[in-house]
Image (tube, coloured by chain):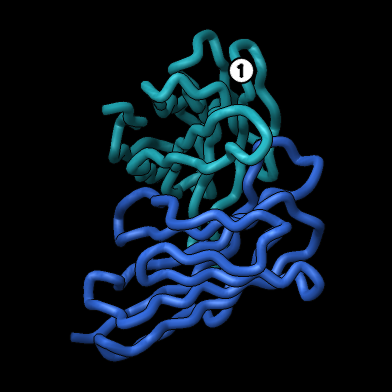
Amino acid sequence: SQQGEEDPQALSIQEGENATMNCSYKTSINNLQWYRQNSGRGLVHLILIRSNEREKHSGRLRVTLDTSKKSSSLLITASRAADTASYFCATAPRGAGNMLTFGGGTRLMVKP
Amino acid sequence: DAEITQSPRHKITETGRQVTLACHQTWNHNNMFWYRQDLGHGLRLIHYSYGVQDTNKGEVSDGYSVSRSNTEDLPLTLESAASSQTSVYFCASSESGQGRNTIYFGEGSWLTVV
């Protein structure tokens, strides 16, 4: 079963707009990570947020974490056509060692 | 540059045949993983290893096996390929230690079982 569930499953926006993706999970975690996957390629790590952090930034990416609601959001500001990809959240459950459990992903399309 | 490579990238095989997907990483990571990716299921963990001679079953391990004889390699074997094992397979690796579980993925192996 998937630990993380992304919402929405698909998102289509115009270039320049912001894109927000959400992730909900079920158990206590050590950290939560976001990955990006271009079509036909492997996943690439974007950002990690620890359970004691509430917000983190990296370039045009902003991640929030609410452990009380067991949810996270990924915001991509000023989107570009090159941001078109699938985005996955992955959680590191407490006590699960170095394993990550992935959600089903959000497919983002940014129209030029 | 350190990397993780998978081979073959694409393979078509027949039902019942044994298939091995190779994974080689030069990160010197202790942790290695195999995931499969299917529409509607996201990524699901097949097997993982935390070091040489260590292997563990993941969420969907039936019909698959792995072995870890050295740090760099974690081959995935399908003992008797089934059509349900048609999928994209990703190998991945990560460092050991608390908070060091950022995973580095290979480019994937597309397997079709006919």
Pick whichever, B25 or B38, lies toward us.
B25
Q: Chain A is drawn in which colour?
A: blue
Any part of residue B12 in sight: yes
Residue B98 position within the rendered picture, expressed as x and y whole percent measured from the top left: 68, 35
Query: How many numbered marks, from 0 up?
Result: 1
- Dividing the picture into quarters, in which one does residue B11 lie? top left
Q: Quadrant of the C terminus of chain B?
A: top left
Q: Chain B is drawn in which colour?
A: cyan
Residue A57 position within the rendered picture, expressed as x and y whole percent measured from the top left: 47, 66
Q: In which quarter of the image is the N terminus of chain B?
A: top left
Residue in the picture at 40% in, 76% down: A76
Pick whichever, A23 or B41, lies toward us.
A23
The chain under label 1 reads: B
Which residue is under mark 1? B51
Residue in the picture at 60% in, 25% down: B65
Residue in the picture at 50% in, 14% down: B71
Residue A108 position within the rendered picture, expressed as x and y whole percent measured from the top left: 38, 77
- Dividing the picture into quarters, in which one does residue B68 lie? top right
Image position of B66 (left or right of B107): right
User: Tag 1: Cα neighbours inside 10 Å, few (<14), some, or many (≥20)?
Assistant: some
Residue B64 position within the rendered picture, expressed as x and y whole percent measured from the top left: 59, 31
Q: In this view, does B32 lie above or below B28?
A: below
Residue in the picture at 40% in, 60% down: A36
- Dividing the picture into quarters, in which one does residue B52 lie? top right
In terms of secondary structure, where does tag 1 sit?
strand
Pick whichever, B85 or A59, lies toward us.
A59
Any part of residue A5 in sight: no
Q: Is residue B21 above or below residue B105?
A: above
**Which residue type does callout 1 highlight?**
Gly
Image position of B109 (left or right of A95): left
